[in-house]
Image (cartoon, rainbow, N blue to C red):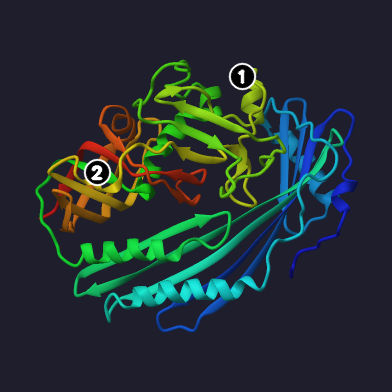
Amino acid sequence: MIGYRRTEGLIGEVRWAPDEMGDASESHRQTWSLTMQGGQAPMVRHGSEYMRSVRVMKNGRLGMATSRLDGWDDLQREARDALRHGVEVAMDVSDILGGRTMPIVSRWDPDWLSSIDATVRAVYEGLKGLSPDFRPVVTVTYHEDTVEMVTSRNGRTAWMRGYWELTAGGRQVDGTDFHGVSGARLSGHGIPDGQKLLDELQARFHWGRSHYVIQSGRYPVVFLPPVAMGLLNPVLARLSGPALVAGNSPWEDQQGLPVLSTAISVVSDATLPEGPRSGPFDDEGTPTATHTLIDKGVLKHFILDRDASRRLGHEPKGMGYRGTLNGPIQAAPANVTVTPGPSTWSELLRRFPGVLILNGWIGGRPTNPMRGDIAGNASDLYWVEKGEVMGRVKNAVVSVNAFDALREQLIDVGNDPQWIAQGMMQIAPGKVPPVLIDQVDVAVKQ
């Protein structure tokens, strides 16, 4: 890669002083994708990014340095220099067994491109046929992260995480009316099912061809997986180890007590074959496992990285991850899963004579995660009567408190979970089903 000075095996030459601990890791992120977009030729792209990181712990402080260019000696010196103003920590480094535990040779096979092309073209043509004015875009991407790590305890290991992502959607502009639909599917086994995503997008597009006017009020709302995942962000914030250590979590003394509806179970699972973060280690080199965070509404475990674990007197749980390749490691789940409920899609829509479906909201994020208040402009909102979708609701703001919604207002949980990729507003990928929540505030501008 241009501008990257990479020397094979140099990571093994990192040396540690007797009075310090630390770890050094090299991450290699690769993506291969094929995109079809209206008015453009199909585009095949390959992206490759490297990052080196060194952490040094001494006298209760942490110094860290990351770079795409610097050699290991330079990085270690920079991390030691950072110790003078480093944050206070109680962390240590993992006892990694010697040897590599997973192959670190890329799994990418160029022969996959023919299958990728077939999937992209099929979904693209299906979306193109919705309307002459509809402008579709479809992408299939294979993501792959390889990490190699050494520690001051003479540990050495390497692991790989890889998954597929299919994203599709488009928009139609009719005067001042903007109608867009989009969706995504993830898979750890191969290219996701394009037909299933296409069917969903076609249905939502036809739902939105007609408009339906409702009055401001409180309504039952089916939160589809993309927005249901957003309701979990305040929950994960209250479970965060750093918030617990700082005394900022209202749940710090609630372990073993009910905090949400009995219909909700939340798990951090690094063992799922299709999970984007599945693997034998987290980004601190700690062995991973499955941890039930909330079991039928009862708080069981917090989200602890190595620092929070040691401060609280616990063994590390393997929940320390980087949000970005060059970002710091933070307390975060592996793959967040919500246990599916008993109800089918049709049953969710027929629980009430009238119900709304919400699939997207602009700005729908908590301003104060510990309080859990979320509000956003509904960009994908539909009205349903007696199980039949009547049309798209425009100019509506949906407001909810995540904790009230998942504790008192939750009516039902669907049985069809969907993977949601990690993004700017969430600290982990998740596999969540739709949820039906009653008495949701909807303000409509007439």
Identify residue for label 2: 347
- In this picture, residue 351 sits left or right of residue 30: left
Query: Residue 44: x percent and y percent?
Result: 58, 76
Q: Mark 1 points at which residue?
A: 312
Q: What element carries label 2?
A: helix
What amino acid type is highlighted by mark number 1?
Leu
Q: Earlier in the sequence, mark 1 or mark 2?
A: 1
How packed mark 2 is, by other alpha carbons closer than 10 Å (few <14, some 14-19, many 20 or more), is: few
x, y percentage for residue 70? 79, 56
Establish if 230 lies above or below 131: above
Instruction: Tell me what residue is drawn at x 20 percent, y 69 percent.
Output: 177
Q: Which residue occupies 38% across, 44% down?
A: 433
Image quadrant where residue 344 sits = top left
Select label 1 or label 2 by which is in front.
2
Report whether 402 appears left or right of 189. Answer: left
Vertical placement of residue 30 versus 244, above or below: below
Residue 271, image x, y percentages:
61, 40
Q: Residue 178 carries which label?
A: none
Residue at 27% of width from left, 27% of height from top? 408
Residue 439 position, x and y percent, is 19, 36
Q: Say if 1 sits above or below 163 in the image.
A: below
Compared across the picture, whether 365 is left or right of 145 comes to left
